[in-house]
Amino acid sequence: MFNRICVIGVGLIGGSIARAVRQQGLSKTIVGYGRQEDEQNLQKAKQLGVIDDYYLDIEPAVQDADCVVIATPVGAIESIFTLLKPFWSDQTIYSDVGSTKGSVICAAQRVFGYIPDNLVPAHPIAGAEQSGVDASLADLFVNKRLIITPSIATRPDALNKVRHCWEQIGAIVSVMSAKQHDAVLAATSHLPHILAFALVDLLGHKDEQNEIFKYAAGGFKDFTRIASSDAIMWQDICVANKDEIIPLIQQTREQLDRIQHLLEINDSQQLFETFTYARKARQRFLEQFETTMSKSITFKIQPGGKLQGEVRVPGDKSMSHRSIMLGSLAEGVTHVTGFLEAEDALATLQAFRDMGVQIEGPVNGCVTIHGVGKHGLQAPKNELYLGNSGTSMRLLSGLLAGQPFDSVLTGDKSLSGRPMKRVTEPLAAMGANIKTTEKGTAPLRITGRAGQLNGIDYVMPMASAQVKSCLLLAGMYANGVTRVTEPAPTRDHTERMLNGFAYPVKREGSAATITSEGSLIATDIDVPSDISSAAFFLVGASIAPGSDLLLKHVGINPTRTGIIDILRLMGASIEVLNQREVGGEPVADLHVKYSPLKGIDIPEELVPLAIDEFPVLFVAAAVAEGQTRLTGAEELRVKESDRIQVMADGLQVLGVNAQPTPDGMIIQGGSLGGGVVTSHGDHRVAMSFSIAGLRAQAPITVLDCINVNTSFPEFKDLVKTLGLNLDCEETSDLNDSASH
Ligand code: S3P
C-alpha cells in the first residue's frame, strides 16, 4: 500500500501502528522520527524491529514518505505541523492519532493558514495504561474502533487510503465530524478520566493522614483504574477538549448535588430510583456499544457463475477453540498451526489471555500457547466477552465452574438469546453455582467452586457436542467420575484432543468418561480446514454447471461428514482423495464437480453430523429436482439464528416453495429467483444465500453479513476468486457511532 511510512512519535500507539503495518505488509519501509531526548526509545524501536530506521531531523525522516503518521500527544501536534510545513508534499498522506480532533484541525489551520486536503485526522480508540514502544503490540487495534474525522477539505482518495490501511490492521472504521467526535469522547472518555483522577487525588491526600488505601475495596480499584493513565497525555487531552468537557463537569456537579440533597432529606426511594436507572442505562449502553461496533456489510451477488480451482479454506472452528482451551491448561508450550483467525476463535483466545495465559499470535494461523497447567488460570479482571460464540460460552462455563475464582461470561445479542440451561442445569447437578437470566440466558455469573464439584452420570436430552464438552471439562475438576451419554453421535474433537494432550478420556459406545486424575501435556496441533466452511463450496460447485473444485486439507472426522453423505444421496459428485491422519484427526482433499441434484428425505441419523451445514443444504434442496424433507432438526432453531425460520423466509423471498416445520423444512426444488434477503446476523445464513447466487435468475442482496467474520472472514474474497460474482458493500452509520 505504501513505500515508506514515517511514524512521528514511536511510543505505544506509534509503535503498535508500525508493528501492525509490518505484520500486514502494508509498507516496504517504516521509519521513525523523534526528538533528541527520545533517541533511546527510537533505538529500542529499531532494535525490536518495529521500525527500520529513525531520524532526529524531520527532513530526511519524511523525505520520500508517502504516508506520515503523527502519533504524538495532541498538545505537540501544532509544533509537529510547524516542523513539517517546509517539507509538506502533495504526494504524501498525513494522518494523526490524536484523542481530540477539533484541536488537530484548528492547529493545521493556524500553521498552514488553511486545512491541507491530504490531512486525514483519525483516532484509534485503543490503548493501554502502559506507554512506550516496549508496550506496543501488532494487534492493539484489532476489532477496536477507529474514527476518521475528515475536514471539509480532506480528499476522498486520501480518506479511503487511510480507512483501508486501518481496516487491514483490523480496526473497525467509522467516519464522523470532528465536532461530533469530540463531544462523544468528552462524555464517554474524558469526563470519566477526570472523575477518576479527581477522586484518587482527593483520597490520596486523605490516605496520607489516615492510610485509607489499606482498606480500599474492589470498587475503588474498578472506578479508578483509568487514573493510572499517562498524566501528560491526559493533561493535553483535557486542555484540547475543554470546551466540550467543562459543561459536562458542571452537569456532574449538579448531579452530585442532587444526590447529596437526597441523602440529607433521607429520600432513599429517589436514591434507589437513580441507582436503578443508572444500572439499567449501563446495560443499555453495553448493548448499544455492541451494535454500534458492527458496521453493516451487505453482499450483492450477480446471478450465475461457476466455481473452479483449488482452495484451502480456513481452519476448523471447533478445533481452534479447543486448541486454545487445552493448550492453556497444559504444562509446557503448545504450538498450533492452521488456527482459525476469525472472531469466534479469537474470542476464546482473548478469554484465556484475560485469565493470565500468555498466547502469541495468531500469525498466519500459528499460535503459541504458554500453558499454565490445569490449576494455573487466574481470575479475569473483567467480564469475559465471548461475542457470537456459543462454543466459547458453553465450554467455558464447564471449565470455569470448578475454578478457585468467580467469573462472568457475556456475549453479543445473538449469544445472549441462546439457551444456556442445557449446560447450567447439569453443571448445577454437579454442584456448580451459575446464575443466568430468568430466561436461562447469558450473562452467566459463575461462582468458582474449586474442589466442590462432583462427577455426574448424565444422559443428554439433545445431541450436543457443546454440552458434552462442557461437562467433560467440568469433569476434569470434579470428584469421582463424570460420564456423558449422547443420544446420537456428535463431534468428538474434545475427546480426541484431550487424548492428544495425554489426558485420559474413555469412550464406550455412546458414553465418554473422565475424572480429575491426570494432567495435560503440551503438544503440537495442526488444525485442518473446516468442513463447515468447505460446505459452501461443496454445495456451490455441486449446483453450478461447469464447476470443478479441489478443496485441500479438509477435516473429515466421521462426526462431521454428514454434508458429504447428504449431498451424495442427492446425487452430488464428491471424491474423497488423499486420506490421511493429522494429529489424531482424519484429513482429506475433496474433489467436487457439478452434478444435477435430486430431492431426498434426509436421514435423521445424519442430522447431528451435518448440524451446521443445513443452511447451505437448504440452498442445494432449492435447486434440486423434487422435494427435500428435513426432520429431527429442532436444534437448528437455537443456533446463531433460528435457522429454520430465517432460511425459509429468505428462500420464499427468492421464490422457492420452502415450508418450515417445527423440526425441519420441506422444500420443493425448482428455480431460484433474486431479491433482498437478510441473514439476521447469522454467518452461515449469509454465506448460504451468497452461494444461492450461482443458480439465481436475478441478483441477490444479502443484508447484515458482518458476522461472516465470526467463522470465515476470507469468504467474500475466496468465493470471488473461485468464480462467484460477489460485491461486498460496507457502511458505517454515522449517527450510530455517537453512542461510543
Ligand atoms: C460445536 C457444536 C455444535 C455446532 C457448533 C460447534 C462445537 O453445537 O453447532 O457450531 O464446537 O462443539 P451444539 O453442541 O449446540 O450442537
Image (cartoon, rainbow, N blue to C red):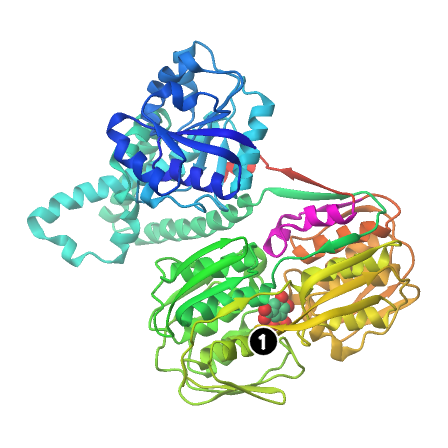
Q: Is residue 694 shown in magenta? A: no
Mark 1 is surrounded, within 10 Å at the Cα level, by few (under 14), some (14 to 19) or many (20 or more) other residues, namely: some
The number of numbered discs placed on residues in the rendered structure image is 1
| Percent of width and height locating residue 256 | 28, 41
Residue 531 figure quarter: bottom right
User: Is 85 located above or below residue 458 in the figure?
Assistant: above
Which residues, given as a range, are shown in magenta?
700-724
Ligand 1's quadrant: bottom right
- Residue at image location 18% in from the left, 41% down from the top: 201
| Percent of width and height locating residue 305 | 84, 47
> With 715 as the anchor, is 357 left or right in this view?
left
Is the N terminus in the top left, top right, bottom left or bottom right quadrant? top right
Residue 463 figure quarter: bottom right
Q: Please name whichever residue, 635 or 371, is drawn nearer the observer in this view of the structure.
A: 371
Q: Please name whichever residue, 33 or 160, is drawn nearer the observer in this view of the structure.
A: 33
Residue 124 figure quarter: top left
Q: Please name whichever residue, 330 or 301, is drawn nearer the observer in this view of the structure.
A: 330
User: Is 128 located above or below residue 401 in the figure?
Assistant: above
User: Is 648 located above or below residue 703 in the figure?
Assistant: below
According to the picture, the residue beneath numbered tag 1 turns out to be: 584
Q: Amino acid at mark 1?
A: Gly
Q: Please name whichever residue, 212 or 27, is drawn nearer the observer in this view of the structure.
A: 27
| Percent of width and height locating residue 351 | 44, 60
User: Is 290 located above or below residue 507 in the figure?
Assistant: above
> With 150 as the anchor, is 538 left or right in this view?
right
Q: Is residue 705 shown in magenta? A: yes
Q: Is residue 125 visible?
A: no
- Residue at image location 40% in from the left, 87% down from the top: 479
Q: Secondary structure at mark 1?
A: loop
| Percent of width and height locating residue 86 | 41, 12
Confirm if mark 1 falls within 8 A of ligand 1.
no
Q: Is residue 406 visible?
A: yes
